[in-house]
Amino acid sequence: MNFLQFTLFMCGQLGVMLLTRFFFQWLIDFCSQSITISSGASISLFSATIVGAALLGFRVFDGVTDPIAGGLADNWVKRGRERRVLLWYTAPIPAIGMALCFVPSIEHSEMVRWGILLSGLFVFFVGYTLYAIPYWSLIGDYAQGDEQRRGKLSTLLGVGLLIATAIGFIITPMMINTYGYMSSALMISVFSIPLMIAPYYASPKIESARSAESSLERDEPQGMSEPMDEGFVDEPQGQLAQLLVALKHRRFLAVICLFAGSQMSFTVMTAAAPFIASDLLGGSKSDVAWILGPLLAVALPSSVLITILARKIGWERSVAIACLALGCVYLGAGGLGGSVVYSPMVTASLLFALGGPMVAVLLGLEGEAITACAEENGGGIGMYFGVYNLIVKGANGVAIAVTGILADLARGGDPWMVKLMGMSAGGMLLLGLISYAALKPSKAKVL
């Protein structure tokens, strides 16, 4: 693969993460905004606590569909079709859903507001699953057994997410201040669709539907190497067998705990950033860039060293160490609001900048970890990504619900509720690390 192909592959992650970063960063803030009506009374568009509970429910529902989507993507390849074709069909769906979530306004009745929001949530989460599982699975298809290429493709997923997060924290606050929530969401949605289709054109020259099929067959567990029937009769049984292979893989489940903790922490910090900037540090929404901008400024160049680090000490040790270090950084959010270094804003900037290298490691090695586990155990890559998303999305739903509750409590003016957002993110990382240590096989080589 050449530089252009690697760039096109990364564009898919940039596009889908532009949607998800905007969604998770601004949805609770959008829903909890207070609006003064004609009578002079101040009301909220939605209850942040109820929205958080709804997000938890959709996360669980969405997670349950992930293994199904993974199995369908693998079966698509088994029939001699190219997995990348699925990107054309699925790219617009999450973009439409995300835009719908920001349509409700105070002019709508409460029932209409909830109807639009819930419809948008359903379309967004289902569309995200249908796009993300086939796209991430392309790591295995495009790597074609080349470990070095697999590591580069995985690192590019992290780079794409970091760039999307940088846009979310630096550009989207200015967009919202200028154009409002709905117009900003629509612009991000339209911009993301061609980016999400771009990985279709990143396929290596030697890639073909048959080579992808052969690669998948080599990865199948014993007793599943025979091609499936062209009909749909055997699909549920085949998918169930693949699902059980992944769920019985103890190392894979242990690694999921690490990434579940990290993904929960990212979700909390993304949603908490506007509250930290305005309620805790006395700034505006645009000041989010001064809080997490330094983190991204450190994380992006650190991505260059991820492949070297993974080859030196292994991706598994790298992820475990990063979880421990980043958890300690986020726990330091309890001290935000004080002028430890020059001013409260500078103190917050420096604190989060310390987490830059760890964020780069966690985001850059995620795809490689899942692909490596699938190849190690002979499972379908799509199914492994599906099981991973099943667990991580449920965990993220809990993180969103916790953030929604803290956001509602923060309205009373208690700064500790905002500090607890950051501290809970650190606690989630450490909990994931402890769960990993408990599940990890004691006598097995570190990958």
Image (spheres, helix red, strand yellow):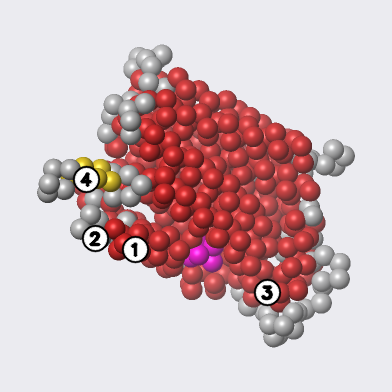
Q: Residues within 10 Å of mark 2 (few under 14, many from 20)?
A: few
Labelled pair 3, 4 in contact (Cβ < 8 Å): no
Rendered image: mark on residue 108: 2
Residue 187: x and y, percent? 30, 58
Q: Residues within 10 Å of mark 1 (few under 14, many from 20)?
A: some
Front position in the image: 261 or 360:
261
Q: Amino acid at mark 3?
A: Asn
Could you tell me how many numbered marks the image carries? 4
Residue 85: x and y, percent? 54, 73
Q: CA distance from mark 1 to mark 4?
A: 19 Å
Q: CA distance from mark 2 to mark 1?
A: 10 Å
Dot 4 lies on which element? strand
Q: Which residue is mark 4?
A: 35
Q: Nearer the viewer, mark 3 or mark 1?
A: 1
Labelled pair 2, 1 in contact (Cβ < 8 Å): yes
Q: Earlier in the sequence, mark 2 or mark 1?
A: 2
Front position in the image: 381 or 52:
52
Q: Which residue is mark 1?
A: 116
Residue 127 part of the magenta segment:
yes
Q: Which residues are magenta?
A: 126-130
Q: CA distance from mark 3 to mark 2?
A: 44 Å
Judge whether residue 130 can be spotted in this image.
Answer: yes
Q: Earlier in the sequence, mark 3 or mark 4?
A: 4
Residue 282 drawn above or below residue 129: above
Rendered image: mark on residue 75: 3
Kindly indicate the quadrant of the structure image that contains residue 116: bottom left
Residue at 41% from the left image edge and 50% from the top image edge: 51
